Amino acid sequence: MATRDTLSPKESACSSGADYAALALEALQEPTDAAYAKELVDRVADECQFTKDLAAVAIVYKQLGDQSRAEELLQTAEDYCMSGEEQVYLAEGKMKILGDKDGAAAALDKALKETNNLDPLIELGKQAMAMMGENSFAKKVYEKAEGKISRAVEYTKLAAAAVEHLLDKDYAGAILEKAAGKLTNVGDLLSLAGETAKTLGDPVKAKTLYQRALDGATDFNAVKSLLDAAKSIGETEFMQSVLKKGGEIATATEQFIDLARGLKSTGDTTGAATLMDQAENAVASLDEMQKVVDAAKSDFADDAARVQRVQAKFDKRAANQAKYVEFGKQEDLADTPKKLFALTDQVMAELEDPFYAAKLLGKVETMLNDGAYQFQRARPLILAVDKHLNDQTWLSRLLDEAATKSGDFTQFKEVIHTAAAEMKNKEIGREKARAYLLHREAGLKANPNAGVYDYTKLAQVILSDLKDSAWANNVLNSAKSAAKDHYALTHIGAIMAQGGDTAGAEGMFMQAAQACGNAEACVQLAARLKSYGFDAAMVRKVYEACGKTLSSSVEKLRWVEGIADELKDKAWASEAYAALESEFTGAGKTRFDVSRMNRVANEFYPYRKHAA
């Protein structure tokens, strides 16, 4: 071996024991230079302090035939081993130096306990497979990874790794099946289907997932992805299903034209003609009308009536080209929903063109979808679609989305009010509002934790927006069974009165009086009845009933004070003091006299009234 007075470039690049070990292993490749390899590890062996470096150097000594030195360094590596990452290096050393499969598995198990994220777990499984030569431990690592993931991209990544690193297609299939059982988003299902076809080579399972994605597709981009999938699996029937679903979702003229051409290519001329009808109805510009004309003449030339009709539409639109051009300029500048709403109103006022209006409102919806859902932003769109288009399908979807995404009851109440009271299409609005309220009611009945005020809030909305007092009373019956205190009972009674059930309301107030238990609660009850606007006679009747439930003289005195303090009726208070006076003696009588003097002195001492 030549004498090395200076470091080679490769040696100069080494900064750790592991680096020197890697260079030494290169030296042990053909042509072998064992002396140089030994020189390299001898140079750093005693200076290594980290498990990675110690294990790497030990492996070189093993290859050099120095088993005792290798085991000595491996033991030091184990003594220094602290982290999960270091346990992997230790496991490699145990396998390569000792052939200790159990020891390696124990080290890897420690590493597994400290590894939690997907990518590190995939890498750990790959390393375990390479070390152990079989996939039992590696599968254990990937099973832990399954518990850490929830997105389609993570499931597909793990499945692909199971095939690539664990060489286990069955396990990869199980991963994808679990994902398919959990995920419902169209994009997720498309991703799973694609991975199923690619990784597992199973077009039947892939088609099942594609069908689920088709069933849940709600936007045109999803349809386009599904069309590509249909072409890839060569299923004409499935392609027809996708194209027809696209017709339910598409909004733009070009989308309908493309779908029509595609459906005609599959042999479904009737369906293709329907899509061309939709393309005509969606036209919002002269350019789009020209495309419809061109498509009719090139792809549907056998339909003479269509060709004649679309040409007439084009001519009419061309006659108003200046107006459309002006609106087109305004459209380009309309960068907020408010501007688009104003332009929509103008288009309908001057052109009466609902198709152009639909295009503009479609842009509004796209803007609103770019961000967190807020009903106050979506409400103007609902009202605009209702006012200008009367598109029941679109309107139903917007309302359903609003009801589903309304988080708290305040937002839900606004959705109900918009549907039931503000829409031009009264029939669909009230029908939707009723359906949402029924669903909400069913949810409350199924929830053992639903409280009194959950039901009373629902009843108030039913009463205020649907004017359905019978239904509101049925909901209040559920509230009554849960009402325990005078607050809840009074609130229920007030809603019953609002619905016209005066007798029922009075009955609830009397129950509230019986539930008070002390004079302070009686005063609170009277105050609430006054705040609800009930007349003095009703308040007095309930307050008298509440007073009759009291047995303590002190409580009765506080009740009498409430007549003066809260009800402001000194004459009644004076009578009540007189009726109560005999129950007080000694120090209690002094307390009684002070109370009466402070509240009804002029009633009790008539001469003071005259003096005043």
Image (cartoon, helix red, strand yellow):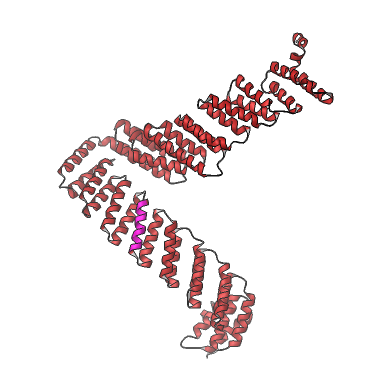
Q: Residue at x 60, y 76 (%)?
A: 51
User: As drawn, which residue projects farthest toward the top?
Assistant: 610
In the shown orientation, is residue 514 left or right of residue 417?
Answer: right
Residue 438 visible, this angle: yes
593 or 393, which is in the foreground? 593
Up/down of 327 relative to 204, above or below: above
User: As drawn, which residue projects farthest toward the bottom?
Assistant: 1
In the shown orientation, is residue 154 left or right of residue 605?
Answer: left
Q: Which residues are magenta?
A: 204-215
Q: Quadrant of residue 532?
A: top right
Q: Residue at x 49, y 38 (%)?
A: 411
Q: Where does the image place residue 455, in percent across and percent down from the top left?
A: 53, 37
Q: Residue at x 26, y 40 (%)?
A: 281
Q: Residue at x 60, y 27 (%)?
A: 509
Q: How many marks?
A: 0
Residue 335 visible, this angle: no
Up/down of 321 relative to 175, above or below: above
Picture quarter with the C terminus = top right
Q: Is residue 496 magenta?
A: no
266 or 371, which is in the foreground? 266
252 or 427, which is in the foreground? 427
Q: Where does the image place residue 452, in percent across and percent down from the top left?
A: 57, 37
Up/down of 280 relative to 261, above or below: above
In terms of secondary structure, what is the magenta stretch mainly? helix
In the shown orientation, is residue 290 left or right of residue 394?
Answer: left
Q: Where does the image place residue 223, in percent across and percent down from the top left?
A: 33, 52
